[in-house]
Image: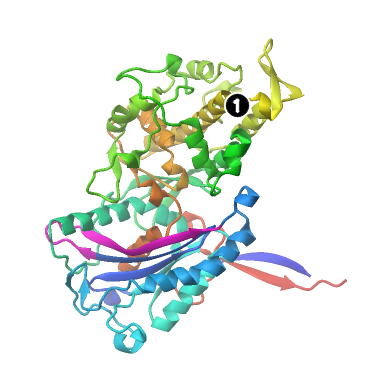
Amino acid sequence: MRVRPVALHAVVRPRLTPGHAPRPRFLLTLAIESSCDDSAACLLETGRCPETGKTAAKLLFHKKVTANNTAFNGVHPLISLESHQENLAMLVEEAIQHLPDRKTTHGAPLHDGAGPTMHAPEELAGSFPGKKLPDFIAVTRGPGMRSNLSTGLDTAKGLAVAWQKPLVGVHHMQAHALTPRLVAALRTFEDASRNKHTLLEDGTNITVQPDFPFLSVLASGGHTLLIRSASLTTHEVMAGTNDIAIGECLDKIARVVLPSDVLQNARNTMYGALLEDFAFPQAKMPAAGSSSPNNDPGFIPQKLNICSEPEPQSAFPLENSTAAQYRSKYGVKYAYEVPRNHEEALKRNVSKWGWGFNQPLAKAAGGLKSKGMEMSFSGLMTAVERVVRYQLDPSTSKLTKTERLAEDISTEERMDIARYAMRAAFEHLAGRVLLGLQQTSASTVVMAGGVAANSYLRYILASTLCAHGYDNVNIVFPPPSLCCDNAAMVAWAGIEMFRVGHRDRLSIRAVRKWPIDQLLSPPIERITQSLTPK
């Protein structure tokens, strides 16, 4: 028996007609995320601050459980699937215990805003008397691991049927791109609570920052995309990788560079984060205005953690400043300056150990500077693996075929390998962002995805933009806790889509590969079985 996947194209997602558009009201959603190895659930409610007119959001419940894949040095599909099956229902059960009272929301009077349902809310409340049920169920539909997605999607369908509520299937990468808008709404609620403002029912329009259009850099273990986000549902892919994602590259580099004891003591498989921690441990801050010799990335700064210096009154720190402000504020911690030309970059890329890593695709055919938008990270990963594996001939500065012993590589050299490799990868990505800005009128760059939590990436991006005249471009970084996969971003993306009338049928299926520029017409992936004669 041979299993043959067949990809068809779906019809456009159903949308309410203008006459059935949702009227202003508080919105409550229960959201589920299960695209990879994180099982997550969330309750999110939105309203409007009358003093500012901005949309406000409150997290009533937000929790996730990550599958233990450490024995496999990476995400194992079956281990992750079992984790979803064991934990997702319990997370939903816990979330239900945090449903708000029907008569109040955000501490303000709740008008009857349950919307049209097939039955009266009291009939559906069942064992939750006095509680407000979600207005709809949001769930990650794709892209991701099909079986893992299906676990979350089937759970969401069951809730939608049991409570007779609409279902909204969310695009995982769209949710990442909208995360800064979620954080802005969460901060608006914080401000309203602090000033004791009573929230009102929200209108059909979401009023948050950043406004469309903006550039989105979605960098994770499975994706590396530069996207022009023109509107909620219009996202143009400007650049992507032609091999592996930057997150996968960093994870694989970490597994060959990190000392064995660091890997053995790892509590999760976020090896890219371990690589950053290893490369930039806490150290004494340099004197103001000082820098490392030749801007060597081997300089050990104080570990930069943007979230360690948030506004004290906010639980959701959002870095939203110009590239110049960001570079000025954190420059001394990394002492990094963008090379003035290709020749300077080549010289700087060579370490004191004799090896070096060049920025991928820096040169096109004929030796000219590449202005292409494609990205590639597999070559850098291979170069790092070779430096770790083979000895260097000091007379030729070339790698030999003689293998190195792990104990022959000092911790200092391993730290330098990590720093130089990350710098090459991040300069490559920042260069594509620069090309994207040159082709659009966008004045804001949004960083999202797990890799966006890397502080060194954030600083290199800001430095690159400043070096090429984009000092005043706003760069928006969500809190690291919301850069990684989570259900809060799924809830928010669902609310934005629900607000403009998008719904999904109960017959929808998980979508393993879903290009974000096909947001409204996702492909339908069916597994068909055909019997073949023996």
Q: Is residue 178 inside the magenta stretch?
A: no
Dot 1, crowdedness within 10 Å: few (<14), some or many (≥20)? few
Give, as a single range, the part of the protein colored magenta: 47-67
Q: Quadrant of the N terminus?
A: bottom right
| Quarter of the figure with residue 63 | bottom left
| Residue highlighted by disc 1 | 365
Q: Nearer the viewer, residue 444 or 485?
A: 485
| Quarter of the figure with residue 394 | top right
**x, y percent for residue 157:** 47, 76
Q: Quadrant of the C terminus?
A: bottom right
**x, y percent for residue 348:** 50, 18
Q: Nearer the viewer, residue 67 or 394?
A: 67
Task: Classify residue 85 as left or right of residue 463.
Answer: right
Q: Nearer the viewer, residue 257 or 444?
A: 257
Which residue does the image show at 61% across and 20% down from the upper left? 355
User: On screen, 66 above or below 510?
Assistant: above
Which residue does the image show at 38% across and 34% down from the upper left? 304
**x, y percent for residue 515:** 51, 55
Secondary structure of the residue carrying tag 1 is helix
Kind of residue sitting beneath label 1 = Ala
| Quarter of the figure with residue 330 | top left
Which residue does the image show at 35% across and 47% down from the upper left? 478
User: On screen, 82 above or below 398?
Assistant: below
The type of colouring in the image is rainbow
**x, y percent for residue 192:** 17, 58
